[in-house]
Amino acid sequence: MNQYDEFSADYHWLYSDGVLAGKPFLEQFEGLLKSIPSNSRILDCSCGIGVHALALAGQGFSVCGTDGSAGMVAQAKERSRGANIEIPFTVSAWNDLPGKIDQVFEVAFCLGNSIGHCANKQEMISSFKGIRSVLKKNGLLILDSRNWEKLHQVKSRFSPTGPRMRHGIRCIPLYCLEFSRLF
Ligand SMILES: C[S@@+](CC[C@H](N)C(=O)[O-])C[C@H]1O[C@@H](n2cnc3c(N)ncnc32)[C@H](O)[C@@H]1O
């Protein structure tokens, strides 16, 4: 989590302005969001800097955001203040959710390849148990994971992003993955 605390203030550079505004997220999940009641309670349990939580709240859903990194949660709070949208953001690792969150949700999102941060199978199981404990019966968990097998196959380490201009600074962020056992 320390890695994200250190990185949190610069995390926004990874995203284009459109992604920061939640556009591709809302497009990707348009069908799902239309299919659930408009008063659904939604948890983003790896909220990062708050991009998806803010997009969901902008659609009128009742949203909470949690993340294991205090730095990321601080950024999410700042972004929601800036957007004048009130969202409760709480620092919580997935397996701590039952002790930190005292409500249940119809839907939980865990996006951005977050679940892959579990160190091992046990941690992943306890994380899923933690998330399930704050979901209603028959609640929905939506999560994604990078296709690591494909990346290992093609040994693709570098992915440049587009140029961004923010606060007078121009930057082209570059993702660099480390495959310590393969390279
Ligand atoms: C790659 S970022 C994705 C953030 C956000 N979902 C997005 O797509 O912008 C992964 C996030 O997972 C969070 N995370 C990692 N391990 C966690 C854990 N055990 N419990 C809760 N959050 C965790 C990190 O702090 C980080 O914010």
Image: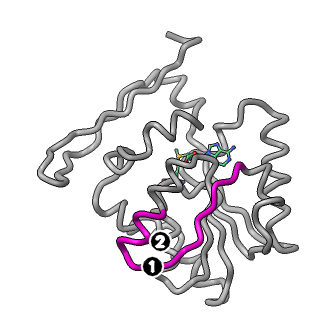
- Whether residue 86 is in magenta: the answer is yes
x, y percent for residue 79: 40, 65
Label 1 sits on residue: 85
Q: Are marks 1 and 2 in contact (CB under 8 Å)?
A: yes
The magenta span reads: 77-93
What secondary structure is marked by label 1?
loop
Q: Which residue is rendered at x = 65% and y = 74% of the image?
A: 42
The one nearer the camera, 132 or 27, is 132
Callout 1 environment at 10 Å: few (<14), some (14 to 19), or many (20+)?
few
Q: Which residue is mark 2?
A: 54
Mark 2: secondary structure: helix
Kind of residue at disc 1 = Ile
Left or right of 176 on screen, residue 95: right
Colouring rule applied to residues:
one colour
Q: Is residue 98 left or right of residue 61?
A: right
Residue 118 image-quadrant placement: top right
